[in-house]
Amino acid sequence: MSGTGPRESIFPTRMALTNTKTRLKGAQTGHSLLAKKRDALTTRFRTILRKVDEAKRKMGRVMQLASFSLAEVTYATGDIAYLVQEQAKSASFKVRAKQENVSGVVLPAFEVDRAPGTDFNLTGLGRGGQQVLRSKEVYAKAVETLVELASLQTAFMILDEVIRATNRRVNAIEHVVIPRLDNTVKYIVSELDEMDREEFFRCVKKVQGKKKRDANATEAKRKAELVVEGPESGSGPAAPGSPEAQAFELPAEDENAAVDLLSSKDGDVIF
């Protein structure tokens, strides 16, 4: 039987069929849009994943160079941490956040805004100034790489959650909603066809019954007319003196003449 399987509890009518077909069409359209969104997010996710891998490798190399440069500064000038802390008045790096829309998903992106100049120009003036400048540039590069990695990692985590939710929705629509509505449509169509067949047979029986009643009435009317016409035009013997009896009576003389002609004998006739 068509329409078997999970379906909605609904009364099979033409209006219900129209509404269910509209919902089925909407579910199919939604499934198509969500599938396209999933593909777009997956493409962007793979691109970000590749950039995250590259940024992590770059971060490892930069931090290695920064550690070596700090070791050189410490070897050349000693500990300069207290000098940097005393001369630092304002931030040299500022992080600005912006948003990027990818298929309806808002992804944060971070950018580095480096202020010109520095507050500790005199650090390392006595000795080790070259090592200090080189360490400063290396750590600035490390900060920029770290901000880039943070931006990519944040977008990666957000896209991961959104793609999982989108996949759940796509699978739910494809394997639950659409089959359920499809089975409901098949059930309603089968029930409406059954109702149409029942109505057709009911009409056929009704027409046949009316034709039979009309035929019986016509036959009864014909028999009644025959019964009424029988006594009026009967075939019994005619009454004496009636015109019919007079028409068939012969005169007495004619009857005797006929008898004489039959009893007389003719003579031999010789030619």
Image (cartoon, rainbow, N blue to C red):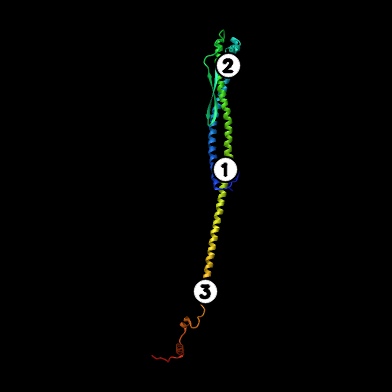
Q: Is mark 2 on a helix, strand or loop?
A: helix
Residue at (47, 83) in percent of width and height:
246
Nearer to us of marks 2 and 3 is 3
Label 1 residue SS? helix
Q: Quadrant of the rendered structure where residue 133 is? A: top right
| Residue type, numbered disc 3 | Gly
Q: Mark 2 points at which residue?
A: 66
Residue 55's mark?
none
Q: Where does the image place residue 106, in percent across and percent down from the top left? A: 54, 29
Q: Which residue is drawn at 53% across and 33% down?
A: 37
Disc 1 + disc 3, Cβ < 8 Å? no
Q: Earlier in the sequence, mark 1 or mark 3?
A: 1
Task: Choose between 249 and 268: the one closer to the eye.
Answer: 249
Foreground mark, 1 or 3, reads: 3
Is residue 71 depicted above or below 148 in this figure? Answer: above
Where is residue 222 drawn, in percent x and y?
Answer: 52, 68
Is 34 placed above or below 79 here?
below
User: Which quadrant would residue 84 be assigned to in this image?
Assistant: top right
Mark closer to the chain start, 2 or 3? 2
Residue at mark 3: 230
Q: Residues within 10 Å of mark 3 (few under 14, many from 20)?
A: few
- The quadrant of the picture occupied by the C terminus is bottom left
**Three-letter amino acid code at the position of disc 2:** Ala
What residue is drawn where x is 57% and y is 43%? 181
Q: Which residue is drawn at 53% across and 36% down?
A: 33
Query: First in sequence: mark 1 or mark 2?
Result: 2
Give the camera-side residue of 131 and 177: 177
